[in-house]
Amino acid sequence: MRGRWRVGLWLLTAAAAGFAFAPAARAAASGEPVQAELLADASAVAAGQPFKVGVLFRIAPEWHIYWKYPGDAGLATEVEFELPQGFVAGELQWPLPQSFVQPGDIAGYGYTGEVMLTAEVTPPKDLPAGKEFAIRAKASWLSCRNVCRPGRAELTAKLSAAAQRAPANEALFREWAARLPRTDKEWTAAGRLHSVAATAEPLPAGAGAKFLIAITWEKKPAKVEFFPAPTEAVLTDKPSVNASGNRTEIAMTARRSGVGAADGLECLVVFTLPDGERGGFPVRLQMPAGNAVAPPTT
Amino acid sequence: MRTLRVAAAAAVVVAALGIYGLRAQAQNSTDVAPGANRNHLPAVSGAIALPLRPAPDFTLTDQKGNAVKLSDFQGKVVVLEWTNPDCPFVQRHYKAGTMARLAKAYADKGVVWLAINTTYYMDRQKDAAWAEKQRIAYPVLGDHDGKVAKAYGAKTSPHMFVIDAKGNIAYQGAIDNDAGGEKKEGVVNYVAQALDAVLAGKPVAVTETKSYGCSVKYPPEAP
């Protein structure tokens, strides 16, 4: 489950290099709620110098797609990059999600409007200038409003190698980079966060724990959101977020499902300041050791 | 034999709770997650059985207009399947025959299968039309005000509940481990796994998973 996103390696043979260039956004037929397009932050890349690729999702009004952990319902969006031989992709980067609570208190985590999921790609050091190559991405998603519709696209972007990098789509990549989580240390250095500390009260026989995350802010946020991103090995109950002055306390119970190994639990804290600035940082919780499985609860 | 097993299980729980008490004490002064206490943990093989939650009783009307009461099936194993004809996850499983095949296979072993449709904008006519179109042999119960869904904490369609012969929830969660419907191998059907264990009088290994699918369509005014 942790590997919901996958970065595949695609061996680009001489024959495959010659396939026709398909305009990226055309994958989704008209009338589809989501259009996906594969973009790069360079039209020409230099040997050994990292560049970024991203799948830009354009989501019709009222519809949403899902974050890497979809919440109570839905399905995580998936992007799998296929790269020429010798190219290496980093982890897929997920911008800060939004939370939408549907009737029945069903929390969904995801995106509306637009979102770009990006990854850094490092080309080989011996990439000859003038060589043309293609990056491919397989994207799949579930889009929902009152009803849900699954969608998928196979996308292609054609690039070339040059002695010097030729940038492209700079503003767009800058915009989405600004919406990525940063570390708590970075937010402390930026004067937003004072401290964050997590404590855990174990459930019987190591079935899980009630976690308490205490945050002190340098700048008091107007809103704090909490997004757990458990693997299939962990079940999380609805978190509570309580603010008091410059402090926020988040409480959440996480239980072992009995499927797979439950060691850690990744979560994301997202704050919105009164001036509209929105930032986030990951918090990794350590599940207690043990192998008891909690009984089903509501 | 059964009594002995229950007593043994209870002893394990008591022992575990005792250890938990000690561990909780040890944790009090710690400012980190409890992984640090790894060395203090009891050596246990296999999952420890903790008490189960009783299944909330309900009376709902099926697609033919018959009242169906859960507690009438006491002594039998019951499967609840939250469903929604409009949901692509449900449609995928009906196309694949997942539910019909399971329901039929376990009906022979005395298991009762009940589908529940909470979708607020649907009604009994819609449930009946869908049951006929899909040739559903089991009751499709209308819960269009969402009260039963709320009592169970149903979040998605499908969302599965296996209720043992004593009326306790022995399993709840996903139908299987293939949310995307793309697995070529290694698909585990959690409901079949739980039913096999319950029918054999064995503890269920996986009692809860995260269900996947469309959100249950509660009425817009639902809390």
Image: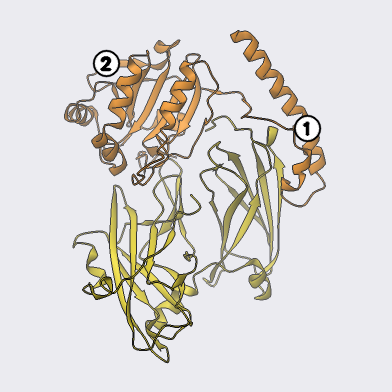
- From the viewer's side, name the closer residue of B145 and A41: A41
- Discs 2 and 1 lie in a common subunit: yes
Q: Quadrant of residue B195?
A: top left
> What is the three-letter code of the residue carrying label 2?
Asn
What is the chain identity of the residue bearing mark 1?
A: B
Q: Which mark is residue B66?
A: 2
| Disc number for residue B21 | 1
The letter of the orange chain is B
Q: Can residue A35 be seen in this view?
A: no
Quadrant position of residue A203? top right
* Residue furthest to the bottom: A163
Give me the chain that's yellow: A
Query: Could you tell me which secondary element the residue under label 1 belongs to?
Result: helix
Relative placement, left or right, of B102 versus A179 is left
Compared with A17, B192 (above or below) is: above
Colour style of the rendered protein structure: by chain
SS class of the residue under badge 2?
loop
Q: Position of residue B196 (x, y in %)?
A: 45, 21
